[in-house]
Amino acid sequence: MNDAYDSSKELQAQVHAAIHSGEPLQISGGGSKSFYGRATSGTCLAAHSHRGIVSYDACELVLTARAGTPLKQVEAVLAERNQMLAFEPPHLGESATLGGAIATGLSGPRRPYAGAARDFVLGVKLINGHGEILSFGGQVMKNVAGYDVARLMVGALGTLGVLLEISLKVLPRPATELTLVQHRTPDEAIEVMNIWARRSLPLSGCCYDGDRLYVRLCGAGSAVRAAHDKIGGEILANAHEFWQGLREQRHAFFDGSLPLWRVAVPPAQPPLDLSGKWLIDWGGAQRWLKSNADAATIRRAAAECGGHVTLFRGGDRGEEIFHPLAPELFSLHRRIKNAMDPKHIFNPGRMYPNL
Amino acid sequence: MSTPIIDARPHERRELIAVLQRMLPAGALLSEQEDLRPYECDGLSAYRELPMLVALPDTVEQVRAILAACRERGVPVVARGAGTGLSGGALPNPNGLLLSLAKFNRTLQIDENNRTARVQPGVRNLAISQAVAPFGLYYAPDPSSQIACTIGGNVAENAGGIHCLKYGLTVHNIQSLQFLTMDGSLITVGGSALDAPGYDLLAFMTGSEGLLGVVVEITVKLLAHPERAQVVLAAFDDVEKAGNAVAAIIGAGIVPAGLEMMDNLAIRAAEQFVHAGYPVDAAAILLCELDGVNEEVSEQILQVREILKQCGATESHTARDERERTLFWAGRKAAFPAVGRLAPDYYCMDGTIPRKHLAQVLRRIGEMSADAGLAVANVFHAGDGNLHPLILYDASKPGDLGRVEELGARILELCVTVGGTITGEHGVGIEKINQMCVQFPAPALAQLHALKHAFDPDGLLNPGKAVPTLQRCAEYGAMHVHGGSLPFPDLERF
Ligand SMILES: Cc1cc2nc3c(=O)[nH]c(=O)nc-3n(C[C@H](O)[C@H](O)[C@H](O)COP(=O)(O)OP(=O)(O)OC[C@H]3O[C@@H](n4cnc5c(N)ncnc54)[C@H](O)[C@@H]3O)c2cc1C
Ligand SMILES: Cc1cc2nc3c(=O)[nH]c(=O)nc-3n(C[C@H](O)[C@H](O)[C@H](O)COP(=O)(O)OP(=O)(O)OC[C@H]3O[C@@H](n4cnc5c(N)ncnc54)[C@H](O)[C@@H]3O)c2cc1C
């Protein structure tokens, strides 16, 4: 890539300086997801300068890129070979980087059917809290040598180290995609999405907006047609924009200043009794809620059915954003943080206070 | 390997027995030498040790009490599922307690709507799929040992199977774990909802070989049975051509449910053993399974057969019916025991390499096998580049095992050299502990030890396995400099 640049030495030097001064670092990829997570302070460590595709072999289904590589560039390179990131990472902005996508661990509409960001991470190169550059995992599909530090980094929001390089499993794009629309009540929608998931159907997305149920099918043309016959519904014309809009939170649902909550529940859970507007994704497993209800009420409702919530956008970013952890689990998190970043220089407090 | 003296610390041992007997039901504590014998090794039978004691608890409270008693006395604890592991992960510690999870064998809940099952760690892999079959569901990872191995052992090794090319490994197919750390904390990670908050400890625990915690409950993800599954068997007169066919299939944008390869020695062994209908004079065969919606499977079979032809397959058959499909797979699934009949003993390796180096690596293994004068049969998960060279030998011949281990070590180092790894699914255990020094530099090993410390500060869970000490690596490096076969066969190994 023409703008590829290896800034690992500079980043490492900045980490060493932080270790000596004790001044924490705020790791930034493209800054596209700076709304996410808790507000923090510290010196900026701009990982976006460390960019470029390191290797990509379509026949191996493996791509390795530096963390600052724009997500757009990664996707464009894959598209040339008719492949994709099957977890459909949300960009949430023009400047999104691969490192930010992996550090937040967010996944798009295909997630319940194809897997999450962490499912596709094969290996990483990182800078730990001693300022050492280390590699874990690898570039092969199966690797159980050593603990899975690579997946530990996914969703850790940069609190355990600076991601330098990431190796991902990529997949061929499906030959055909087709989106069908049906009118359903909320209870019906949740029920039918889960009935479909228990059958052999080529699903790749299931979303419900309170009136219309959208189901995306993918695979060989014949398979998609056969599935269409089985489940029925109107064909959606601008399907690509629809799913991309959902992934990028561009639908009208996401407008307005009410706090946005991500409510994760077992997929077949009937609608929760919470005030606000709902948008259901992931076949029922991820439900967006725009609501003024207080945090404790929302957390309790989700926890009662085995779920958890995240204050995704808005609200008070100095308070708890992520679902509180059980005390013993939290103290294990602290010990893990200490093992990776003993001086607490990486994004302190970004995920939880005191972490 | 030598017979240990089981009461090296007679006083401590007697005291621990007294304490444990008070809290465990009758028969749940074994301490007589003949009762300990069945636990002396796992599937890697070249390594044997008698544990100090074996406990077979059946409640989480009992496990917690056992851990507390051991922790107080600094006694190491080694968890054990079915003992089918192939890297010595469940090899007892001579001064430690072997914690068998065999009695944790209940399926606690099947949630058909959410497509999950909550099970205890001692439930056998295949038993899960059997229990959920009435709902049209199954648990995807299918190690060849699935009749016997436990889900707890699968989690600890991140086990794979024939179908993990499309459906993923254990880590991709579990949703929640409950485990006890050595200090008795019962920790739940993951949950019935996706993508739990905090660090991904569900992934981190998976494949941790019993070094971080004792898993006491697992929630697995269940899938709908594909409408149709069909397998194509293709023969090649040259291993390299078969390797190229693997790349061509994946390169064409097809993700088979399974894509397996066997070389001539393995083909003949399997054919003799199960009469699967394999062509015994082929240099290699490929088994390519396609599954999913009926129409798609039909389309892909045609595509795959065309690719196989172009890649020079001498013949290819699609299984005529379910019976024949099962038979084709039976040969593959029985490949290890089948090869095992060719010689008194065999040693199974587990490296993974980028697929593009398949042909080259197989050629090198052939040369190394000839140099060492030890026959090697190759059976592997070709689709994901996971090799299982099986080295044939005779353990009763003095020096044979040493030569086998030396050849195995060279094979694994070759895997690392071409950009792969020393273990794809069987784990490091005690077997590949030295090769870890080749794959990881000292600071990375130190980081792994620091993480272990976060879970188990006293280092009492499965000590000496999975991650070598830096000192051990220094010694191994030194041995290597002296070259050739291991110069100190009786060097302290634990
Ligand atoms: C004084 C100051 C200076 C700033 N300077 C800059 C600047 O120069 N450039 C800039 O883009 N923003 C800058 N910001 C914005 C700020 O960094 C963002 O608001 C926020 O820190 C994170 O952006 P982002 O990483 O979320 O973007 P994303 O790329 O979306 O990252 C999302 C999450 O991933 C983490 N992350 C991203 N990349 C990596 C990586 N390689 N390794 C580990 N974790 C990673 C982030 O820490 C964050 O938690 C600055 C902010 C302040 C207060
Ligand atoms: C013929 C044969 C074929 C095989 N084929 C495959 C294959 O296709 N794919 C594959 O991946 N493997 C395969 N294996 C290897 C083996 O079956 C797997 O590694 C399996 O996951 C081990 O399960 P187990 O219950 O026997 O565990 P054990 O051997 O008893 O233990 C394995 C490790 O797990 C730890 N452990 C066990 N239970 C727990 C627990 N509850 N909590 C914490 N730690 C625990 C042990 O301490 C040990 O380190 C095969 C083995 C044989 C003999």
Image (cartoon, coloured by chain):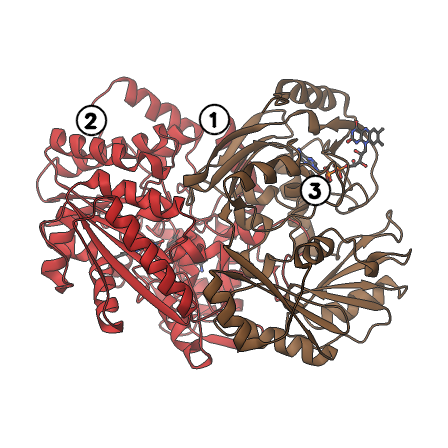
Chain colours: A brown, B red
- Residue hosting label 2: B485
- Residue B177 in view (yes/no): no
User: Is B42 or B11 nearer to us in this picture?
Assistant: B42
Q: Residues within 10 Å of mark 2 (few under 14, many from 20)?
A: some
- Residue hosting label 1: B442
- Identify the amino acid type marked 1: Ala
Q: Which mark is residue A157?
A: 3
**Residues under numbered marks 2 and 3 in contact, where contact means CB atoms less than 8 Å apart:** no
Chain name for mark 1: B
Q: Residues within 10 Å of mark 3 (few under 14, many from 20)?
A: many
User: Among all residues in the image, which is located at the extreme front?
Assistant: A237
B314 up-or-down from B29: above or below: above
To the question of a shared chain for discs 2 and 1, the answer is yes
- Identify the amino acid type marked 2: Ser
Chain name for mark 3: A
N-terminal of the two: label 2 or label 1?
A: 1
Give how far across and how far down residue A9 sits, in percent: 62, 18
**Residues under numbered marks 2 and 1 in contact, where contact means CB atoms less than 8 Å apart:** no
